[in-house]
Image (cartoon, helix red, strand yellow):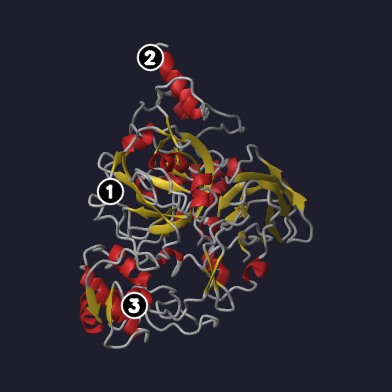
Amino acid sequence: MSNEDKTGLARRRFIQTGFALTAGATAALAVDDAWGQFDSQGNLLVAPWTKKTGADFLTPPYGLPSKYEKDVVRILPTPAAAFPTASRTPLQNLYGIITPNGLIFERHHAGVPDIDPDVHRLVIHGLVDRPLMLTMNDLMRFPSVSLIYFLECSGNGSAELKKRTGTTVQDTHGLLSCCEWTGVRLSTVLAEAGIKPSAKWLLAEGSDGAAMTRSIPMQKAMDDALLVYAQNGEMLRPEQGYPLRLFLPGYEGNTNIKWLRRLKLGTEPWQTREETSTYTDLGADGKALQFTFEMGVKSVITKPSGGMKLKQAGFYEVTGFAWTGAGKIRSVEVSIDGGKSWDQAALQEPVLNKSLTRFRYPWMWKGEPTVLLSRATDSSGAIQPTLDEVLKLRSANSVYHNNAIQPWLVAANGEVSNGR
Amino acid sequence: MDARELVKTKYLCTVFAIITMTSSSSMATDIGHQRTFGLGQPVTEQQLRAWDIDIAATGAGLPAGSGNVGQGKLTFQAKCASCHGLEGQGGLANKLIGGGNLNTAGAVKTIGSYWPYATTIFDYIRRAMPYGAPQSLSNDEVYGLTAFLLNANQIVGIDAIIDASSLPLVQMPNRSGFIRVER
């Protein structure tokens, strides 16, 4: 990247957001004439790109973001993990509530398989009248639905339970995304096989190298579960389960089995490794909570957030996401004084069931050091807890379901950091 | 009713769940009040045998075969120790033995300290291990590894033979350590 490009990048960010990342080329903000856009009196000149024809269409045929957005990417663990873990969504760079397909967080347990949809099969058996094998073509012929839901790993924020580890909101909350999912209702497909009344649990199994399995209550399967094959208007991405995944709105991410190959109906949970050894919540008394499916009410400010810098005193929009596995977000409160006072944030419509909800709050920063907080309340009346409340009664080795309020420290020089 | 009209009617019936249908021929067929679409093919147990690998906590699904601690130790050293350590003490991958009391800050969740069901050991090893070559072990090898890991956690004796009838009877130390929330 040339110096001119760097200057342009930093300047454009400043203009659009009022924030600049502390890392990178932000020092060059003062240069106003980087493009030769102004004359010596500060009058605008016609830009060079206005005086020529632009690039052709279809380069490449599948479009990509502007080259100036090249830093808006998922991040991988550093140092690299010995086994596949997760990549994280850049929440600080998102707008609205939909996560673009190339930025959706990943979590897999044995890598991403390469599956030809023409040879993929889903089998439904166990306590059914007619065991069935379905092709993708079969599944895509059923009546379909498209619905917007969030997806969050229950390990999102797990490291923060013990100590401050993350710098940015991508580090601390990046195992979170929200898509429009398209597929068929699981209840529709199960009816095709005929459910025996004795069926109370369903085993969902992936065809990846982990053959990932979770036991799901039939009540959830018949309520709002989906078999999805598309997200945000196109077929699933390979890392999201292409060509087929189970989707359980509001449930912890791990239960949304990717690369789904088999559903077996039974009377009891199978007690798989992923619902005993992992994805269970150990308490301080040594007892563990099991089948804690629902993601708790949670919110986080994504702007301003860790790693950003407020360049000067003045107006800023405080914005972020709120979500709950229990239903809809009822309200989000923001505090700009470390929790001494709270005020209602505006919720951007649509406020959808088990979806991310965008909140916004206008803030005039006078240049004082402070702490920014957000606190969500959901339609069940549940209020997002503080970290102390989350940790109460938990084991020191607790890993999952951290839905604590996230503090962002704002220093007098405008630098924003993790206030965990 | 012409063909196009029929299709439209069927679609509306399907999508809006109109149970009572005047047309006797329909895309959605009622079977005991459940609508079906005639999609998918019947599948037999024989056809899906290679995929039907889940083991229930009761032991249902455990295959024929058996293994003992000595055989399991050899398999472990050859195929597992490079990640989990020679004795299962952990390395690149999880510690599999010991772990301490779960109500202490230093507790580690292992097969011995945490896993509530012995059947899960067989199920998980067979479906997902060894990392990089899942579903490559014979049932006898998986039984042997299960015996070795149970013995290494002092849950079964050195002479134990693990098979479909003995494995579900193994009492895991933390069997009563879980509270089912189901929500």
Q: Nearer the viewer, mark 2 or mark 1?
A: 2
Quadrant where the image shows the N terminus of chain B? top left
Give the Cα distance between marks 3 and 1. 29 Å
The local secondary structure at tag 2 comes to helix
Give the Cα distance between marks 2 and 3. 67 Å
Residue that numbered label 3 is attached to? B91
The local secondary structure at tag 1 comes to loop
Measuring from the top left, give residue A255's x and y in whole percent: 46, 55
Residue that numbered label 2 is attached to? B3
Identify whether A207 is placed above or below A224.
below
Dot 1 amino acid type: Asp
Dot 3 amino acid type: Gly
Measuring from the top left, give residue A82's x and y in whole percent: 34, 67
The 10 Å Cα crowd at callout 2, few under 14, some 14 to 19, many 20 or more, is few
Quadrant where the image shows the C terminus of chain B? bottom right
Measuring from the top left, give residue A361's x and y in whole percent: 71, 46
Q: Nearer the viewer, residue A307 or B90?
A: B90
Measuring from the top left, give residue A340's x and y in whole percent: 78, 61
Q: Nearer the viewer, residue B152 or A157?
A: B152
Q: How many marks?
A: 3
The 10 Å Cα crowd at callout 1, few under 14, some 14 to 19, many 20 or more, is few
Residue B122: quadrant of the picture: bottom left
Residue A138: quadrant of the picture: top left
Label 3 resides on the chain identified as B
The 10 Å Cα crowd at callout 3, few under 14, some 14 to 19, many 20 or more, is some
Q: Residue at x 23, y 63 (%)?
A: B133
Q: Are marks 2 and 3 in contact (CB under 8 Å)?
A: no
Point out which mark residue A114 bears. 1
Q: Nearer the viewer, residue B87 or A239?
A: B87
Residue farthest toward the right in the current orientation of the protein: A341
